Every structure is written in structure tokens, then in C-alpha cells.
Image (tube, rainbow, N blue to C red):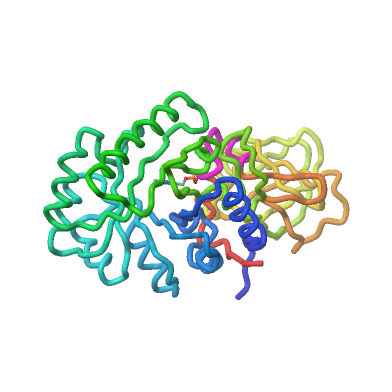
């Protein structure tokens, strides 16, 4: 296979980050590998993570993602965070997936058709998925009636990175819910609420953490205390080097106009590879340890960069889109900030055309 753009996945770093999360939290890890493991390649990442004993489960968003892991040979338990729709139920059975049940519609769906165990999700402030604390008695009555096996109880933080007060309330509220279950004789094996940003909070009654971004080495908040390192670096190649004259305009729309004669390079990486078009005239790549700014609009397959002052550049040379080279670095977070978004989105956007290579 010949590819022009690729993402190198540093498996040692992935393992080290996972280890650091475990050491910090002292809790089992439910590793989130949804969305193709945040763009890193879910089967490959899961193969590495499933060998780690304290990684208790892999979490995906949908049954379809769970199927993909099973077809890729993954044996570890798989929790489907996004729950179950009627038409997906057969997948849960066929591929041995475990649903997160977060409302009565889903609960009633299980009835006699699903005999595996489930995790129940409670909404303590996110207002996305989850039962309310007020539903607890009804839920318990129903699962006892129908003999539904509850292996886990969970909730989710919307703002652990920015709102300690809300997060604290959530930890208390979730404890009340857990206690109600325990008083009713239901003691699920897995109790979890912490995501990556939530790791810095104490939750003594929880026994595992449900983390994604920290495993991939990106900090969920600026003052995140764990030592983690970026797992994925993204690279491409220069496919043409040429000159432009003062006054020439570059790329679609001519949004860059040269104020002097310049040397430019054409890089085989565009928005179809996952480079945000918002980086037009703003972002930069690394060429031979030097920053090289993006000129004009990012196009679907190519991006034009300024090679002025960078010696010895030739066609075929490697360009770093995300990663570290000498003293210079471009992180997912740097790109996210330039695009007014979060590193999660930039990672997920790295597209299929970019070949993933596991180191
Ligand atoms: C994606 C997700 C996580 C992981 O969040 P990170 O911030 O990546 O650690 C945890 N729980 C749920 C329900 C999620 O959807």
C-alpha cells in the first residue's frame, strides 16, 4: 500500500498513559474506544488495551461499533454507552454486547428478549441520557419483577473541567442513588461516574473510571495533574515545491496574497483528511523542525504552506500536521484552540484516508 498521509500510533505511550490513569485513580478502567477510538483505530487500540488486566471493559457508543470490535477479534467485555434501540437488540445478543440502559423505553425493550446483564445510567445533571433519581423506585421494582441483571450503575459529568460545584453535587446525588439500590439488596459490581476530567475528584464509593481522552494523551483541562503523552502524530508529504511572485494569490478564493516573492510547498493533506478548514491562513505545519504557516484556504486534498527560509525542502519530504519535532510541537489542543473547539473533535476528524500505523 502506498499512502501519502498517515497517523503514527505510539502504543507504548498508550500503555503508559493507561497505567498512569490507573496509578492515579487506583480504580479499574473502563476504556472508551468509541468513534474509532477517538480516531486512533478502535480494533488496534482495543487489541492493546484488552491485554491490560485492570482494563475491565471497552466502551463504545453504538452496537455497530461493538460489532466491529468483535469482528476484529476483540474478546473483552464491551459496554455500549449509547444504549439500545429495538432494531439493535439482536446485535447485543449475537455479538455479546452489554447495553447501558438509561430510560424506561430501553428497559421495557429488554423484557424476555435479553438475558445478559446491563448497566443502568442515571442523569445527575448532564441532561442527556439517564433515569432521574425520582425514577429509582420504579426502576428497582421493574428489574426485580423481570429479573434483570444489573451489573453496573453509572452517571456522567458534563462539566468536571469547569464546574466543581455541580460536579460535587453530582457525586453526592449519585451516591444517594447507589445507596437506594444497596438498601434494596442490589449491589452492582461496577459503580462509575468519572470521565477523564473527573479523575481529579474523589469518589470513594465508585470502583472504576470511564476514560477516553486521557488514554490518548490529551489533557481534558489545562491544569490536569496527570503525566500523559499524546499517542497519535499525524504526518503527510510535500508533493510539490515552487515559487510565487509578489502579488500572486494562493488557493481557492485567493484569500492569501503574497507581499513578496516566496517559496511555497503543496502538502497532500486537506479537509477531507480531517484538517479543519478554519486553519486557512491561520494554522501551521512543521517542516524540518520549523513552523511553516498555512497560506490561503485549506482545500479538500491539499494545503499550501510557506517554505520561505526553510532550506533543502524537496518533494517527498515529510510534514508534521500534529506532533513534536525537536523543540516545536503542534498538539490537538493547539489546533482545537485555533478552531474554537476541543481536541476530541480534531482527533475524531482525522479521516479514513489517513493510514493508521501502530508503532
Ligand atoms: C465519551 C464518554 C466518556 C469518556 O470521556 P473522556 O472525557 O474522553 O474521558 C465517558 N463516559 C461517557 C458516557 C462518554 O460518552
Q: Identify which residue is drawn at 78% across, 49% down.
A: 243
Q: Is residue 2 above or below residue 176?
A: below
Q: In this image, 59 relative to 253: left or right?
A: left
Residue 8 seen in this snapshot: no
Queried whether the magenta region covers residue 268, the answer comes back as no
Q: Is residue 119 above or below residue 276?
A: below
| First to last magenta residue range | 333-344
Residue 191 appears at what percent x and percent y?
A: 38, 47
Residue 278 appears at what percent x and percent y?
A: 56, 38
Which residue is more in the foreground, 288 or 243? Answer: 288
Q: Is residue 118 above or below residue 70?
A: above
Q: In this image, 236 relative to 261: left or right?
A: left
Queried whether the magenta region covers residue 335, the answer comes back as yes
Q: Identify which residue is drawn at 24% across, 58% down.
A: 149
On the rendered image, what quadrant is the C terminus found in?
A: bottom right
Residue 271 appears at what percent x and percent y?
A: 54, 49
Which residue is more in the foreground, 62 or 131? Answer: 131
> Image quadrant of residue 222?
top right
Q: Identify which residue is drawn at 44% across, 30% down.
A: 167
**In terms of secondary structure, what is the magenta stretch mainly?**
helix
Q: In this image, 246 relative to 311: left or right?
A: left
Which residue is more in the foreground, 205 or 274? Answer: 205
Residue 116 appears at what percent x and percent y?
A: 25, 64
On the rendered image, what quadrant is the N terminus found in?
A: bottom right
Q: Identify which residue is drawn at 74% across, 45% down.
A: 329
Q: How many marks?
A: 0
Residue 164 seen in this snapshot: yes
Amino acid at each position: 500500500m502506498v499512502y501519502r498521509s498517515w497517523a503514527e500510533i505510539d502504543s507504548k505511550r498508550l500503555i503508559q498513559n493507561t497505567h498512569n490513569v490507573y496509578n492515579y485513580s487506583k480504580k479499574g478502567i473502563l476504556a472508551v474506544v468509541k468513534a474509532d477510538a477517538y480516531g486512533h483505530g478502535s480494533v488496534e487500540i482495543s487489541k492493546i488495551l484488552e491485554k491490560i488486566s485492570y482494563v475491565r471493559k471497552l466502551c463504545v457508543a453504538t452496537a455497530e461499533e461493538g460489532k466491529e470490535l468483535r469482528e476484529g477479534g476483540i474478546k473483552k467485555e464491551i459496554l455500549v454507552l449509547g444504549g439500545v434501540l429495538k432494531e439493535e437488540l439482536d446485535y447485543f445478543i449475537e455479538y455479546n454486547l452489554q447495553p447501558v440502559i438509561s430510560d424506561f423505553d430501553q428497559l421495557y425493550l429488554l423484557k424476555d428478549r435479553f438475558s445478559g446483564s446491563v448497566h443502568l445510567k442515571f442523569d445527575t445533571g448532564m441532561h442527556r441520557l439517564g433515569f432521574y433519581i425520582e425514577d429509582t423506585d420504579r426502576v428497582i421494582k421493574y428489574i426485580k419483577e423481570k429479573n434483570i441483571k444489573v451489573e453496573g450503575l453509572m452517571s456522567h459529568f458534563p462539566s468536571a473541567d469547569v464546574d466543581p460545584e455541580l460536579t460535587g453535587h453530582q457525586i453526592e446525588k449519585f451516591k444517594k442513588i447507589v445507596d437506594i439500590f444497596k438498601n434494596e439488596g442490589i449491589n452492582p459490581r461496577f459503580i462509575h461516574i468519572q470521565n477523564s476530567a473527573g479523575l481529579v475528584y474523589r469518589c470513594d464509593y465508585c470502583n472504576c473510571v470511564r476514560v477516553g481522552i486521557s488514554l490518548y494523551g490529551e489533557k481534558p483541562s489545562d491544569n490536569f495533574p496527570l503525566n500523559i503523552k499524546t499517542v497519535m502524530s499525524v504526518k503527510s508529504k510535500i508533493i510539490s515545491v515552487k515559487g510565487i511572485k509578489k502579488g500572486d494569490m494562493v488557493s481557492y478564493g485567493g484569500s492569501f496574497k503574497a507581499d513578496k516573492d516566496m517559496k511555497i510547498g503543496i502538502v497532500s493533506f486537506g479537509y477531507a483528511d480531517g484538517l479543519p478548514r478554519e486553519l486557512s491562513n491561520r494554522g501551521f505545519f512543521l517542516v524540518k523542525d520549523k513552523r511553516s504557516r498555512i497560506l490561503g484556504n485549506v482545500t479538500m486534498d491539499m494545503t499550501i504552506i510557506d517554505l520561505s527560509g526553510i532550506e533543502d525542502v524537496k518533494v517527498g519530504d515529510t510534514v508534521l500536521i500534529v506532533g513534536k519535532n525537536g523543540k516545536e510541537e503542534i498538539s490537538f489542543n493547539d489546533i482545537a484552540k485555533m478552531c474554537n473547539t476541543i481536541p476530541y473533535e480534531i482527533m475524531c476528524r482525522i479521516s479514513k484516508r489517513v493510514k493508521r500505523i501502530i508503532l
